[in-house]
Image (cartoon, rainbow, N blue to C red):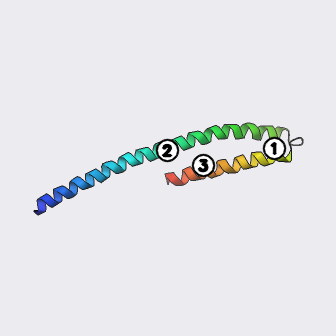
Amino acid sequence: MGLQEELKTLSDKIKQYRDEARVQLHLARQDVKDEFDDLDQEWGKFRTRFDQVVDDASDASQEARQTVKKLGEDLKTGYQSIRDKIK
């Protein structure tokens, strides 16, 4: 095989890898977007519960406060994960 053929083969292989990487990148972006959308739904639930606990702070049970705290920690972890995937 001559140098010209080797370079053509190399170019074709690079193009194939590039195309595959582009598809994987697009799919990864969609996965991250889907994950973000799911977290946003949880954010709405968290805000509702958070507002209830804050408004009724004196009446809110320890269990209610712990539930809101756990939801908040889970959301924080989820958003940090998305942020790290985007970097």
- Decide: is 10 above or below 67: below
**Residue at (18, 56) in percent of width and height:** 9
Number of other residues with Cα within 10 Å of mark 3, as a class: few under 14, some 14 to 19, many 20 or more: some
Q: Residue furthest left?
A: 2
The residue indicated by pointer 1 is: 64
Picture quadrant of residue 47 = top right
Look at the image and tell me in which quarter the N terminus lies.
Answer: bottom left
- Mark sitting earlier along the chain (2/1): 2
Residue, disc 3: 79
Residue bearing the label numbered 2: 31
Looking at the image, tell me whether mark 3 or mark 2 is earlier in sequence order: 2
Q: Quadrant of residue 49?
A: top right
The three-letter amino acid code for the residue at tag 2 is: Asp
What is the number of callouts on the image? 3
Q: CA distance from mark 3 to mark 2?
A: 13 Å
Residue 49 relative to residue 32: left or right: right
Which of pointers 1 and 3 indicates the residue nearer the eye? 1
Q: Are marks 3 and 2 in contact (CB under 8 Å)?
A: no
